[in-house]
Image: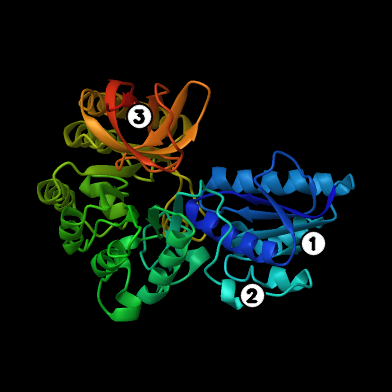
């Protein structure tokens, strides 16, 4: 146990990671030494930032809390604090069941942790973060909450109504990050496309991206977590016209059959979805689309799933993930449907879907062989430099493994000729 050292563990999505980074900066300013995601408790204080989205994530969060609670029982830890989505939703239940935790905080009151440690919250560092990512890229959260009413989703119960950050505040944060050496920005939100409706009474994502792309030093902007219904199509013009806005869009579609889209309360039809995807590809040539599909939602028939498989085969998404339906309490589904599809069927459908996607991903990557792509180098291992193209987001997408023929610098861009491909990774060498 090391005095004045705090272990911060972040579970769940990159939006949680931003909260942890904001907290860590305040802790550092107050004289603490920080370890992010340590393998075991080393400090005298630990903070667990939890996820509460679906069953597996909740289980992982509870198990992590219990691991650190056990360390506290064995006197390897003095104080244990828990924050984030799980404790936002289940604070009282967790307080009753895990008394080893000194205090639970939600998703929005974590600043009180600073005061409870007897320390000061530095307002002048409000947008300053201790980055847990490599120093050349960062996540930028442009809003909190969600106003959508998808049948299966517990996020609005946790995060509340949609709340956009003012554009000026986001620009200030970007300038600060650029001054610290950040070149690449992953824009994140529960729903990027809704941005601005609450503050400005109209969708302002295209204007926000345009303004940020004008900031000197912003090399790449990548967009995550768009929603298909009422998509602000002027964003496509911005992507096409601005070289530093990556031709990449993460847009979760969840399903394609009209039956399932209606049951899921997605406010879009199959044909509208097909038309939207065609517009993406027509207006932004070369765009890479990342999407997420759900299998096993209540009411999904084998015919619905086969329709989804056919759609994925035909559409050929460059990036696709899938997950089985998780029945969450207090959601629309919890009030109106039962979780009527066996777990084995959900898993079998997900496996079949991902088998189809693996073939597509290999074909997409093989089409890049012989081409020269701009790559940012993330790290170096014994055999390769490892980087990403504009079509690859950290953690979720593939990488480019670059031969070590020449010395490269982590965080810099290089023109890399692609020499071979696997389903999710590319191999290349530096263009001479």
Q: Nearer the viewer, mark 2 or mark 1?
A: 2
Helix, strand or loop for disc 2: loop
Relative placement, left or right, of 144 versus 261 is right
Q: Nearer the viewer, residue 354 or 20?
A: 20
The x and y percentages for residue 298 are 38, 46
Crowd tier of the residue under label 2, counting other residues whose Cα lies within 10 Å: few below 14, some 14–19, many 20 or above: some
**Which is more N-terminal, label 2 or label 3?**
2
Q: Residue at x 21, y 23 (%)?
A: 370
Helix, strand or loop for disc 1: loop
Q: Is 395 above or below relative to 218?
A: above
Q: Nearer the viewer, mark 3 or mark 1?
A: 1
Q: Which residue is mark 1?
A: 102
Q: Is 153 above or below relative to 108?
A: above
Verify CB contact (< 8 Å) between mark 2 and mark 1.
no
Relative placement, left or right, of 206 versus 146 is left
Verify CB contact (< 8 Å) between mark 3 and mark 1.
no
Q: Residue at x 38, y 43 (%)?
A: 393
The x and y percentages for residue 235 are 21, 61
The x and y percentages for residue 237 are 15, 59
Crowd tier of the residue under label 1, counting other residues whose Cα lies within 10 Å: few below 14, some 14–19, many 20 or above: few
Question: Which label number is shown at residue 354?
Answer: 3
């Amino acid at each position: 146990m090391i005095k004045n050292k705090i272990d911060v563990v972040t579970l769940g999505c990159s939006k949680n990671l931003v909260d942890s980074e904001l907290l860590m900066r305040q802790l550092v300013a107050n004289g603490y030494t920080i370890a992010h995601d340590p393998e075991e408790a080393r400090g005298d204080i630990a903070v667990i930032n939890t996820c509460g989205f679906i069953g597996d994530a909740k289980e992982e969060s509870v198990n992590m809390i219990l691991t650190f609670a056990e360390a506290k029982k064995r006197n390897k830890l003095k104080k244990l604090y828990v924050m984030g989505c799980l404790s936002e939703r289940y604070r009282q239940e967790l307080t009753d069941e895990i008394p080893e935790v000194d205090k639970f905080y939600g998703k929005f009151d974590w600043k009180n942790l600073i005061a409870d440690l007897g320390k000061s919250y530095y307002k002048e560092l409000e947008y300053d973060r201790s980055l847990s990512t490599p120093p050349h890229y960062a996540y930028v959260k442009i809003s909190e909450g969600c106003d959508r009413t998808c049948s299966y989703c517990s996020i609005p119960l946790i995060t509340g109504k949609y709340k956009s950050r003012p554009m000026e505040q986001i620009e200030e944060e970007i300038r600060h990050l650029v001054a610290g050496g950040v070149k690449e920005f992953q824009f994140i939100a529960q729903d990027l496309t809704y941005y601005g409706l609450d503050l400005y009474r109209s969708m302002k994502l295209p204007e926000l991206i345009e303004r940020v792309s004008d900031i000197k030093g912003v090399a790449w902007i990548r967009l995550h977590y768009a929603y298909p219904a009422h998509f602000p199509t002027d964003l496509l013009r911005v992507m096409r016209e601005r070289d530093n806005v990556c031709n990449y869009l993460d847009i979760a579609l969840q399903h394609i059959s009209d039956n399932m889209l209606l049951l899921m309360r997605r406010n879009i039809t199959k044909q509208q979805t097909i038309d939207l995807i065609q517009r993406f590809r027509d207006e932004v040539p070369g765009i890479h689309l990342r999407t997420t599909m759900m299998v096993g939602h209540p009411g999904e028939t084998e015919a619905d799933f086969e329709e989804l498989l056919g759609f994925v085969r035909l559409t050929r998404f460059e990036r696709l993930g899938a997950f089985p339906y998780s029945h969450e309490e207090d959601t629309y589904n919890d009030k109106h449907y039962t979780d009527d599809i066996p777990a084995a069927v959900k898993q079998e459908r997900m496996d079949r879907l991902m088998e189809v996607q693996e073939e597509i991903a290999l074909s997409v990557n093989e089409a890049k062989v012989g081409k020269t792509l701009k790559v940012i180098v993330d790290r170096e291992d014994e055999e390769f430099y490892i980087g990403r193209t504009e079509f690859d987001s950290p953690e979720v997408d593939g990488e480019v493994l670059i031969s070590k023929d020449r010395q490269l610098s982590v965080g810099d861009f290089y023109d890399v000729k692609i020499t071979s491909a696997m389903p999710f990774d590319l191999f290349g060498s530096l263009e001479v």
